[in-house]
Image: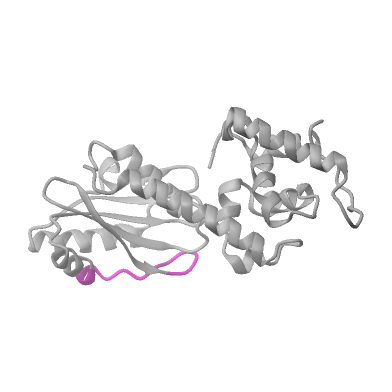
């Protein structure tokens, strides 16, 4: 999911010459201008990859399969206007996607498949690797999974003695600004997995990853519980929309 195209650029590109005009389609076969538009988009994608297309055209490509008998440009535009980016569209909860005009179960299923594939790919680049030497892959995974969630999620990454990631588990989900965390349960699970170190990760749905005082207090409690049992807390990452905050780098640990 590319971060290269801003939403403003997306809006400007909606009237590109290659784009099919927004108008109701007649019954029967697709008009030739839409058929040609779809063919050109597919060709550009196959030649240049995702970087050759702005977000709205990549979203159109995805919608072709779920909406084969419709001009998908207005639907793509509505989705981007509603959620702000390609990443936010595919990460949106089904119940919220369903409120967008023109979006049904088939489209939602396709969007959720794309989201799941992105998560799986990012996870495969981070799992069973030394997190210190593959830190960027770990950050990419955390951003892919959590940056555009609309509620808080708290995850724990469990590491072995060689700092290899052996497990990644969700420990809690919450509201838009709070998720309950129980330090005792975190360290208990680490012992069950025979882990030697931990990395805490949670997101801020507001988009601002600045830690709250509650975040700092909870981290100190987990660190204290971990130290008693000989476990190392390497870091606590707070994931925002565009960046993350590392407790270690900011001096909180």
Q: Is residue 177 magenta?
A: yes
Q: Is residue 71 left or right of residue 140?
A: right
Comparing 116 with 35, the one in front is 35
Q: Is residue 100 left or right of residue 114?
A: right
Q: Position of residue 57 (x, y in %)?
A: 69, 40
Residue drawn at 66 percent across, 60 percent down: 107
Residue drawn at 22 percent across, 59 percent down: 220
Q: Is residue 77 left or right of residue 184?
A: right
Q: Position of residue 163 (x, y in %)?
A: 17, 46
* Residue that extends furthest to the front in the rendered view of this protein: 29
Q: Position of residue 244 (x, y in %)?
A: 40, 45
Comparing 97 with 202, the one in front is 97
Q: Is residue 123 left or right of residue 30?
A: left
**Does 137 sit above or below residue 211?**
above
Residue drawn at 43 percent across, 48 percent down: 143
Q: Position of residue 40 (x, y in %)?
A: 73, 33
Residue 46 occupies which quadrant of the picture? top right
Decide if residue 220 is in sight here.
yes
Q: Which residues make up the magenta segment?
A: 174-185
Q: Main secondary structure of the magenta part?
A: loop
Q: Is residue 136 magenta?
A: no
Count of all numbered marks drawn on residues in the image: 0
Comparing 158 with 6, the one in front is 158
* Residue that extends furthest to the right in the rendered view of this protein: 26
Decide if residue 210 is in sight here.
no
Q: How is the image coloured?
A: one colour
Residue drawn at 52 percent across, 61 percent down: 150
């Amino acid at each position: 999911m590319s971060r290269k195209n801003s939403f403003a650029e997306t809006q400007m590109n909606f009237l590109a010459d290659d784009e099919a005009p927004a108008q109701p389609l007649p019954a029967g076969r697709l008009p030739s201008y839409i058929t040609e538009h779809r063919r050109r988009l597919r060709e550009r994608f196959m030649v240049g990859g995702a970087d050759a297309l702005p977000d709205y055209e990549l979203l159109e490509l995805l919608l072709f399969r779920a909406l084969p008998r419709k001009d998908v440009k207005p639907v793509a535009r509505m989705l981007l206007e509603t959620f702000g980016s390609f990443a936010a569209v595919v990460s949106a909860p089904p119940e919220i996607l369903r409120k967008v005009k023109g979006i049904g179960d088939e489209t939602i299923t396709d969007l959720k498949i794309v989201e799941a594939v992105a998560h799986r790919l990012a996870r495969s680049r981070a799992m069973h690797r030394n997190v210190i030497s593959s830190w960027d892959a770990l950050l990419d995974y955390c951003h892919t999974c959590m940056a555009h969630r609309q509620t808080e999620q708290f995850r724990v990454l469990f590491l072995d003695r060689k700092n290899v990631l052996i497990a990644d588990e969700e420990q809690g989900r919450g509201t838009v600004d709070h998720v309950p965390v129980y330090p005792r349960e975190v360290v208990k699970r680490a012992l069950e997995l025979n882990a030697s170190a931990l990395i805490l990760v949670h997101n801020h749905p507001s988009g601002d990853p600045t830690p709250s005082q509650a975040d700092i207090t909870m981290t100190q409690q987990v660190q204290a519980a971990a130290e008693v049992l000989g476990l190392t807390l390497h870091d606590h990452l707070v994931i925002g929309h565009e960046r993350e905050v590392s407790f270690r780098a900011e001096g909180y640990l």
